[in-house]
Each structure stands twice: as C-alpha cells, then as structure tokens.
Amino acid sequence: MPMQSAAADRRPTTDPSLAGPRAVDRPAAPRLPGRAGPVLMAALVAALGGVAVRAAQPTGYRQLAPGVLTVIPADRSGDDALLRADIPEITVGLADIAWEPKQAPVGATLVGRGRTIDFPRDIWCLEFAFKPPRQIDVDVPAPNLRMQRKRLWYLLYRVKNTGARRIVMEEGDATRLASEPVEKPVRFLPHLVLESTEGLSSAEGALAYRAYLDRVIPSALAAIREREDARLDIHDSARMSERELAPGEERWGVATWEDVDPRIDFFSIYVRGLTNAIRWRPRADAAFARDDVPGAGEEHALESLRLDFWRPGDDVTTPDEEASVGHAGMYERRVIGNRVIQALSRPGQTTASPAAGLERLGLTWEDLLDPPAAIEAATRVDGEAPPSLAPLGRVVKAIAAVQPPAARPLATETLLGDLGRERFEDLVRGLSMPLPAEQAALRQGLLEQCGVSADDVAARPLESLGKVIAALDATPSAARRRSAAGGLFGTAAVRLDELVREVDLVRAGAILAGMDFDRRPVLSGGALTAYDTFRTLVDDEPDADRRARMVAGLLGAEGPTLLGAAASVTEGVDHAWVFRYER
C-alpha cells in the first residue's frame, strides 16, 4: 500500500491583489503669484484631474472586494512526489516460489525486490480560487428542438499554474531527499461534481445520496458573464481543457449544473483535476496471480478538492443569492440536534408518554432498535435501502396482545399520542377498505403473498397487519415497497412511513426521559445546542456497547453514520483534500 503522508496546511486565504480600486488622492494645488496664478492653477488642476481619472479607471476585469474570492493555495509540500508500495503481482502472485538465498540477502530475490518500491514523480497542484455558488435562470435547448427556461447552479472559479515539485537527492548524501520547484505547463481537465447526502423526503430518512456532474451549457455563458463581469473571459469545462496552462498563467472558468433538486440546502462540490497526486490500493475482490499485468488488481484515485456549502432555506424567489460557505458535518450536526429537539418536545405537543406507553405494552426502548442489517445498509448512504419496519412490527404485535381489546386504543394513544393513534387506525382500516374491482384483485394477490387472507384481515386485523409489515420489511427496494404498500393500503399507505417516524420518536423520547439533564437550554438553544448536549450525554456513558445502542436508539439506523460525519471535523474547516475511490 502507498505511504500515507500528511498533507500541508491548505486553509483558504483571501488574495490581497483582488482588493477593490482605491480612490486616487489629488495633491493640493500650489499658490502662484501674479496674474498667471489663476491660469496656471486651472491648467494644473485639469492636468492632475485627468491623471486621477485615468488612474482610477479599471483595467481588465472588474476588481473584487477583499473576501469575495476564496483562494486555496496550491500544495507546495511535495508530500505526494514520492510514494512507497509493494507490487502485489510479485509479492502476492509469486509468493509460492519465494525462497531465502544462502549467499545473498533476502531482499535480492524477485519477491524481496518487489517490496517497498519507490515511485517518484513530479507533482503539480493548481491554485484554486472561487466565488460561492449561485443560481441563474437561462434558456437552454430542450429535446423538442425548442428553448426551455431552466434554473442552473454555477460556480465561478479561477485556476493558476504555480509550478510543480520534484523529489531529489541532496548533494553528497544519497539517503537524504528534498523537494525542488519545477516549472512546467499543466493541462487542467475539470471534473466538478455537486453532491448532497441530505434526505429530502420522509422515506429517504436523514441521508440520501445525490450527485450532479458539471455540464457544458454554451447558452448559459453569456448570461453568467453579464452577471459576473462582461469583460471576463470565462471558460467552460470543454474549453478549459483545450490548451495547457503555462507556468504562472491563470484562467477563469465556470461549472454549471442542470436539474438540481431545489430542496437541497447542504451540499459539497468535489473538484478533480487540480493535481496529479494519486493513491492506489488492491481491490477488495482482487486475487493476484503470477501472470497478472501490474496494476490490473488495483483501484486508483486522484486527489480531489472538496468544498462545503449551505443555502439558508428553500427560497425559490431569489436565485441570484450566493450559497454560504459551510463546513463538513454541519448538516449532520443539525440533523442530530433537530432529532433530539423533536423527541423532547413531542410529549408537550401530543398526549404521548413514550416511557409510560412502552411500559404499558411490556416493551423497552431497546426492543425497538433497528436490526443490525438495517444499520449496515444505512451506512452505505446510497438512498436504496428503505427504513426498517421491524420496530413498527414489534409495536403492532404488542398492541395486538393487549387484553381486553377495548384497552388497545388507550394503549396506542399513550405510546403514540392522539395523532399517532389516528394514523394507526387509518393504517389498520386500509387493509379492508372497499376498492374498485381491479384494485381489490391486486390487493388480494398481495395479501396472499404476505400469507394473509381477506378473512384473516376481517377476523384478526392487528395480527394480519403485523404479517403484512413483516413481508414489506423483507422487500429490499424502496420503490417496490412503496408500490406494494400502495396496493395493500390504498390512500392510507402514507401512514406507514408516518408511523415509522412516530416509533423512532417514541424510542428516542424514552431514552432521553431516563437521562438526568436540564431540558430547557436544549429546547430554547436550537439544533447546535441540542447536538452539543447529545454528544455530552453519549460521551458520559462509560459502557461502549450501551453507548452504541443509545446512538442507534436516538438517531435510528443512520445514527452511526450521522455521528461519525458530525464528529470527524472541526467547525470552520470549509474544504478538504481527499482521495475518493469510485466504484
């Protein structure tokens, strides 16, 4: 595996050369004697005024005020100029013929010489400066050969070739390595992807992956130039890659994204092509053999720059507003904090009493944890795995066991509140509600697949609901589950996802009810205050297993992923250099 070297400090800075034009101070006119004084003074003032006007006129493109452009300097450390790694096609593929020589060092064998190989190379890294992303409405070509008005997202940026680094041996000492600057032309091949893991619907949960690749939209360039600076030569990604950047040359570019979901508030932009720094590793399924071509069993990743942003709300009326520079983990921290606030405030908003409701049903909050398979699926954050229905199924089974049956509505309301009880009753009625003949036949077929008949639904509605929920939970696809739920429950199918959220809040509320802390600052301090309180409560738990169960109980199957992302960075770090292995 390659040596993982520490990256240099590459925090953004503001380019002082981009300050706005300053007023030119005019010198005071001298006092001149005699009649010539007024004439000469007028001429002198006119001349000085003309100089001032010419000096104040901007040259080139519009000058930007300090702080408008965020500049991320190129990495000049040279850390990636020398990597060390084994050649697995030799060290693994030929391991069966490895031997220890008797009159030579072990490292002299072919297998030995395939270990810890140096891979030196010139490493270049471009300076990258950008303005925060904005939106713009423009006319773009549509499939029907007409123009269509669309809202585009775009990022205006500047790249500059500041040179490369090379590893050399210090003179007189072959064991000491140093890096030296190298000037060389660089071809920038832009690859910008706008990504978000923000869940935008209840069925997606808190995390759902979305990605949008930069698209070349020639009709948008004129509108963007008119807004930003009509004198600025802006390159799209295709034109940017046409010719190399000479040493010291800088160039302006723009990335544009089409059909971005307008509900996205938190997102990142990954910029690849700014450097040729690379990492590689064996593929998980690689099996090296002696006749394999070197590199055939490896996956490679170029270093990418990640920029984090957030938008203050879903305001569709002001597309020209810039996104705000954010930081990694901001979205996850707010999600966690909001989940805690919802769980704490729920008893005051409804008639629910989570702890008393669980006790009445003979359950504990740990009985409502998502199964390990659901937690593992949630860590992939691919938006494909639907939320687990197992906790809701256990609640249905417990309610069905309440005797006498007349006590079940009160037990349901104690656990879920009055609104939750109504949703639960709607879902139960949905299995038997009258439907048109074609839809009724479809529901009958789906019930048979769940091992339930129409007579079972009429005689034992809660037991039948439990079997249906178990069958739906075994459906791996979110789309297939939604389709099946619609056929089974009709218009009441929306209650299924709503009850899943209700059970999640019950579980979280029961956990928080058993903890001794002051709830008033949490409820009045906002999401970030709630997150800090949550972290304190979790960190104070000495038992690691119980701590993990608390995280899963408070945040659901996505809890470990949310907490890991929220705690992995320091607030204020708004970018990072990362290696991403794409599958």
Image: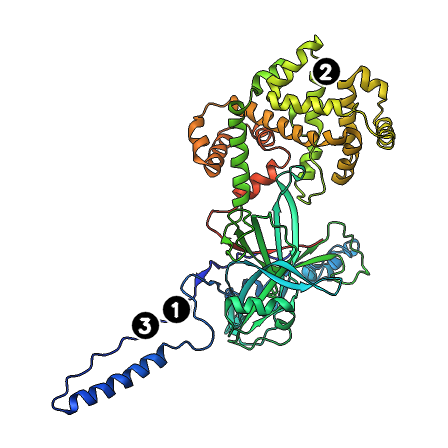
- Secondary structure under tag 3 reads loop
Judged from this view, the residue extending furthest toward the top is 404
Provide residue 275's location: percent of width, then percent of height.
59, 65
Nearest the eye: 56 or 35 = 35
Residue positioned most to the left: 34
Q: Residue at x 71, y 39 (%)?
A: 385
Q: Which residue is mark 1?
A: 20
Specify the amino acid type for callout 1: Gly
Q: Is the C-beta separation of discs 2 and 1 under 8 Å?
A: no
In terms of depth relative to the viewer, which is nearer, 536 or 300?
536
Per the rendering, the mark at residue 400 is 2
Query: Residue at image x 59%, y 68%?
Result: 221
Of marks 2 and 3, the one in the foreground: 3
Residue labelled with disc 3: 23
Q: Earlier in the sequence, mark 2 or mark 3?
A: 3
Q: What amino acid type should be assigned to the residue bearing mark 2?
A: Ala
Question: SS at mark 2?
Answer: helix
Report, in whole angstroms, how far the alpha carbon at label 2 lies from the one at label 3. 80 Å
Q: Disc 2 to disc 1, how far (Cα)?
A: 72 Å
| Image mark for residue 296 | none
Circle 3 crowding by C-alpha within 10 Å: few under 14, some 14–19, many from 20: few
Question: Looking at the image, which is closer to me, 542 or 479?
Answer: 479
Q: Secondary structure at mark 1?
A: loop
Marks 3/1: CA–CA distance: 10 Å
Amino acid type at circle 3 is: Ala
Q: Position of residue 145 (x, y in %)?
A: 74, 65
**Mark 1: few/some/many CA within 10 Å (<14, 14-19, 20+):** few
- Quadrant housing the N terminus: bottom right
Residue 180, horizontal then vertical, whole percent: 51, 72
Picture residue at 55% right of the left edge, 33% below the top:
339
Can residue 396 be seen in this snapshot?
yes
Q: Is residue 432 above or below residue 264?
A: above
